[in-house]
Image (tube, rainbow, N blue to C red):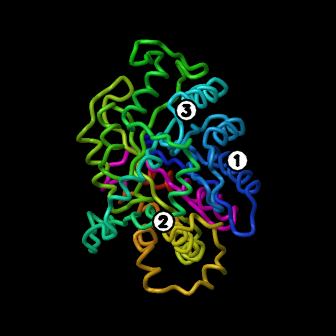
Amino acid sequence: MTEPRTPLPLSILDLAPVPSGGTVAGALRNTIDLARRAEEFGYRRYWVAEHHLVPGVASSAPAVLIGQIAAATRTIRVGSGAVQLGHQTPLAVVEQFGLIDALYPGRIDLGLGRSGQRRAELLAEKDDPGPPEAKVVDGLLIPPPFSFAAVARSPQFAFHASLLQQPGAVAPDFAEQVDDIQAFLHGTYRSPEGYPAHAVPGEGADVELWILGSSGGQSAQVAGERGLPFAANYHVSPATVLEAVEAYRKAFTPSAELAEPYVVVSADVVVAEDDATARELAKPYGLWVRSIRTGQGAIPYPSIAEADAHEWTDEDRALVADRTDTQFAGSPETVVERLRVLQRVTGADELLVTTITHDHADRVRSYELLARAWREAAQEDQR
């Protein structure tokens, strides 16, 4: 009998969400528990995001959390999705991840992002990001783009940005920082005057370097030109995912890390036994996205009752429509089919799913149901 082919890998992006009525300590314990379960379910990677100064997300220090997850698991790859380079130096990043790799060799992913460097670009954006029409590409919804320009101009946003850097500090160019990180990892770093510097720990670390991006801009270009794997964010910016993967592949140059482009694409997912139950569990998502896009920052993740109690305006609905319309909520069969469409249209080599529900048990169950259905679908393809 022909062996079933290995299904396209599924991985997890976790924000360590704090539910309403919960605590940061509880959220972190849930993350550790979910990572253990994800390993049992067969997910390839477990990444944690970096967010700051918001009450609903506990993943403010990826390196610290990654070390805890790696200690609690045995085989699953663990990493960042992503470290924001606008907030710290390349040496600091390499030392942190080199330390983790020294303790858990061969399992650590270092995902890099430039959200911390984008404020000037956001300030230059227009509030109206473009034409309002959505489109469907081979079955995949591509909604109109959303602009964070209004949020970036808020005094609170500027205040928060000031707390993440030393006074007067200016983040270097993203490409230069990526080059410096690679040089520290390879032991080739030199100052402009030619002085060497060696990261200990860090030099020679067996970490897998990734670039994350939401558009066809610098992140995609840097990943492609340096021959690094690239993660495109359909869950954050569904309007620009196709241009992101296209720009990356167009810029790709083979490297010692990769002979061909490698793309992981993210998606927001909620899976339950049937479509109706999944849609019920997904109800709070829109209210949570609204808190982010109104400048509050992510609130503690609402309960279904709190979501039901919110009085939605047309303006509210328009504010979150691109995210709620592209969330994959349904039965295992429904979500597998939608993820297959996402993979087909983007050409993804791997999918990165992120699930947030108010109750931890529902989140664990969602990942369990998805992993099982994904394997079964691959096996069915062989029959």
Callout 1, which amino acid? Answer: Ile
Identify the residue at horizontal 65%, vertical 66% (top origin): 300
Residue tagged 3: 93
Q: CA distance from mark 2 to mark 1?
A: 35 Å
Q: Tell me whether the residue at label 3 lies in contact with that at label 1, contact meaning CB atoms closer than 8 angstroms.
A: no
Name of the residue lying farthest toward the front: 168
Identify the residue at horizontal 49%, vertical 61% (top origin): 268
Q: Is residue 9 magenta?
A: no
Callout 2, which amino acid? Answer: Ser
Q: Secondary structure at mark 1?
A: helix
Residue tagged 1: 32
- Numbered label attached to residue 374: none
> In the rendered image of this protein, does residue 202 appear above or below residue 228?
above
Front residue of this view, candidates 262 and 56? 56
Q: CA distance from mark 3 to mark 2?
A: 29 Å
> In the rendered image of this protein, does residue 53 appear above or below residue 309?
above
Disc 2 crowd rating (10 Å Cα; few below 14, some 14-19, many 20+) is few
- Answer whether residue 139 is visible to the viewer in this image: yes
Q: Secondary structure at mark 3?
A: helix
Front residue of this view, candidates 50 and 250? 50
Q: Is residue 40 left or right of residue 349?
A: right
Select label 2 or label 1 by which is in front: 2
Q: Tell me whether the residue at label 3 lies in contact with that at label 2, contact meaning CB atoms closer than 8 angstroms.
A: no
> In the rendered image of this protein, does residue 80 appear above or below residue 195?
below
- Answer whether residue 44 is visible to the viewer in this image: no
Where is residue 10? Give x, y as percent: 49, 48
The image quadrant that residue 357 belongs to is bottom right
Disc 1 crowd rating (10 Å Cα; few below 14, some 14-19, many 20+) is many
Callout 3, which amino acid? Answer: Val
Image mark count: 3
Which region shows up in magenta?
A: 343-371
Q: Earlier in the sequence, mark 3 or mark 2?
A: 3
